[in-house]
C-alpha cells in the first residue's frame, strides 16, 4: 500500500503538468469518483460536472498531506478547485506521452492536457478513488482528521499527538490522526532506527525518545523519497518505474533474518492487525 514516500514521488512526478490546461477527461469507471475523501464510491451517476473534473482549468498546484494527493486547478474565472486522488491499495498515477495507454483495463480516469500528454489514474483493486472538491474549505474538511505530515513532524508535535496514550507506539504511528503518511513499512523502519521496541506503550516513552522517533521518522521517509518509494507489489511512479526503497528496509518483511547491525534474529508479531518486525537487541 502506498505510504508517504510513494505518494510524494508521484506528486513530484506530476510537476511537469503544472501550468498546463486540462482539455478533456474520460471517466471510464464512475464508481472510482467518490463524494468525499474516504467515502464509499459515488452511486449517483451523472452528478459529475465537467468543471469539477478540471476540463477548461489549469493545474496550478500539487498538494500532499500524508498519503493524500490533490491537484489544484483554476478555471478562467480564477475559481480554484481540487482533485483529490487516493491511491488506496494499488492505485497508480502515470503521466504518458504516447497514444497507447498501458494496462488500459485498470485505467479508470484519463485527463488529457493541452500538449496531448495524459494523466491516468489506474487502480486494479479499486480501494482508491478520485474526489472532486469545489473549494479550499472542502479540502480542509476532507483532510481535517489527519495529523501533521510525517515528513516534517517535529518532536513537540509528536509528543503533543501521542499525549498520554496507553496504546503501543507502533499502533499510534499507524494512526493517520496522530501523524499523516506513515504505514506499516515506515513505522517499523522508524522504530528500528530510533531503537524503540514497537510494543512500548506511548506513555512509557521519554521526551527524548519521542524527539528521536520524530527525527528518525523524518529521516526514514526522506531516504525513501530519495529512493523513489518502495515497490513490493503494485506501486509504480508516474513514469511506470518501480521504486528502490525496499532494498534498504532493515526490519520490515525480514522476520527470521539476521539484523544487519547486531546479527540477532528479527522477530515479528501482530500489532493493530499488522505484521510488525523488530530486532530484540537493537530495540529494547
Ligand atoms: Zn539488531
Image (cartoon, helix red, strand yellow):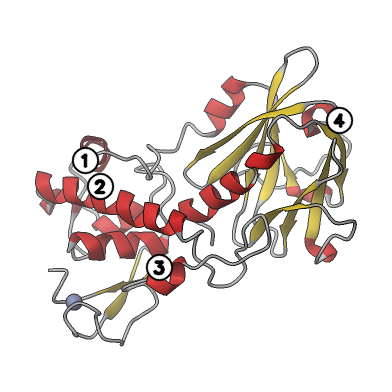
Kindly identify which residue carries mark 2.
214
27 is higher (above) or lower (below) than 245: above
Mark 2 and mark 4 residues within 8 Å of each other at the beta carbon: no
Mark 3 or mark 4: which comes first in sequence? Answer: 4
Q: Residue furthest top?
A: 77
Q: Where's residue 43, x and y in %?
A: 79, 44
Q: Which mark is residue 245?
A: none
Mark 1 or mark 3: which comes first in sequence? Answer: 1
Quadrant in which the C terminus appears: bottom left
Kindly identify which residue carries mark 4.
50
Mark 3 or mark 2: which comes first in sequence? Answer: 2
Mark 1 and mark 3 residues within 8 Å of each other at the beta carbon: no
Q: Where's residue 51, x and y in %?
A: 82, 26
Real-space Cα separation, disc 2 to disc 4, in angstroms = 42 Å
Q: Is residue 255 left or right of residue 78?
A: left
Is the residue marked by circle 4 packed among few (<14), some (14-19), or many (20+) residues within 10 Å?
Answer: few
Q: Where's residue 187, x and y in %?
A: 34, 59
Real-space Cα separation, disc 3 to disc 2, in angstroms = 21 Å
Amino acid at each position: 500500500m502506498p505510504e508517504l514516500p510513494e505518494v510524494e514521488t508521484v506528486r513530484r512526478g506530476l510537476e511537469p503538468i503544472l501550468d498546463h490546461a486540462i482539455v478533456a477527461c474520460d471517466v471510464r469507471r464512475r464508481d472510482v469518483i467518490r463524494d468525499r475523501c474516504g467515502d464509499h464510491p459515488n452511486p449517483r451517476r451523472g452528478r459529475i460536472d465537467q468543471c469539477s473534473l478540471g476540463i477548461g482549468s489549469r493545474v496550478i498546484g500539487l498538494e500532499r498531506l500524508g498519503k493524500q494527493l490533490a491537484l489544484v486547478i483554476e478555471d478562467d474565472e480564477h475559481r480554484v478547485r481540487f482533485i483529490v486522488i487516493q491511491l488506496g491499495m494499488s492505485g497508480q498515477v502515470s503521466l504518458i506521452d504516447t497514444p497507447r495507454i498501458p494496462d488500459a483495463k485498470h485505467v479508470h480516469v484519463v485527463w488529457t492536457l493541452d500538449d496531448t500528454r495524459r494523466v491516468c489514474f489506474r487502480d486494479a483493486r479499486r480501494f482508491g478513488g478520485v474526489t472532486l472538491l469545489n473549494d479550499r474549505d472542502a479540502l480542509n474538511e476532507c483532510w481535517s482528521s489527519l495529523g501533521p505530515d510525517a515528513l516534517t513532524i517535529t518532536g513537540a508535535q509528536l509528543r503533543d499527538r501521542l499525549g498520554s496514550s496507553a496504546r503501543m507506539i507502533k499502533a499510534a504511528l499507524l494512526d493517520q490522526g496522530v501523524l499523516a503518511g506513515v504505514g506499516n513499512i515506515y513505522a517499523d523502519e522508524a522504530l528500528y532506527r530510533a531503537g524503540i521496541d514497537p510494543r512500548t506503550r506511548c506513555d512509557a516513552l521519554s521526551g527524548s525518545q519521542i524527539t528521536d522517533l520524530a527525527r528518525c521518522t523524518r529521516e526514514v521517509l526522506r531516504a525513501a523519497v530519495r529512493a523513489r518509494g518502495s515497490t513490493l507489489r503494485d506501486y509504480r511512479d508516474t513514469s511506470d518505474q518501480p521504486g528502490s526503497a525496499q532494498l534498504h528496509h532493515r526490519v520490515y518483511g525480514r522476520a527470521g533474518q539476521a539484523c544487519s547491525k547486531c546479527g540477532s534474529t528479527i522477530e515479528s508479531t501482530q500489532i493493530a492487525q499488522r505484521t510488525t518486525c523488530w530486532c530484540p537487541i537493537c530495540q529494547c
